[in-house]
Image: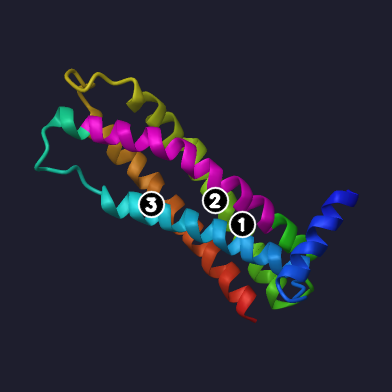
Amino acid sequence: MHRLVLCVSRLFVLFGGCIMSWLSLLSILNLFFTGTLAGVEVASHYGFVTHPTFLGEADQIRLRQALIRRLRVLVPAMFGPAFLTTVAITMLSATGLKLDLRGAALTADACWIYARIIATVRINSDTINWDPDAPPPRWPGLVAKAERFHIAGLWAVTTAFLCLLIAEAL
């Protein structure tokens, strides 16, 4: 603990004695992780909302598998810190509109978790194991079902980000 205090005090001296409160630092980290998660959700959904028709079925499945492999590490890496910092900031919030907005952000985060656990994680886990040259007969229907939950998750995390951004602006 002593070393941590020493390192932090040296950083304050390096930055001209400008001391940022821990709550401000936590808020910046929260907006970074939540905003990054919202951006990843928007890009992954609207970038691949429909099947790329110029690709054959096998290539569409390979593309989906590649995205799932990358995003199954990136998304939890962004969501974990985003959720934890949202909980911390909400607990440290004063009463009033800021607390209400941060509570709404936590509710939106809970909706995102629900949308992910109920549908997309299960279908994405199955998609990884599909043979691109012999996909399941109803694979477009399975993907369409997951997309309905994905859009709910997308708007939930975007709502959380907007609530946190407005709360910080107040």
Check residue 130 for magenta coloring: no
The residue that disc 1 covers is 107
Pick the residue in front: 57 or 13: 13
Element carrying mark 1:
helix
Quadrant of the image containing the C terminus: bottom right
From this viewpoint, is residue 156 visible? no
Q: How many marks?
A: 3
Element carrying mark 2:
helix
Q: Is residue 74 left or right of residue 25?
A: left
Whole-Å distance between the Cαs marked 2 and 1?
Answer: 6 Å
Which is more N-terminal, label 2 or label 3? 2
Which of the 4 quarters of the picture holds residue 10? bottom right
The residue that disc 3 covers is 151
Residue 47 position, x and y percent, is 27, 52
Q: Amino acid at mark 3?
A: Ile
Instruction: Name the residue: 41% across, 52% down.
Output: 41
Q: Which residues are magenta?
A: 61-86
Q: Amino acid at mark 1?
A: Thr
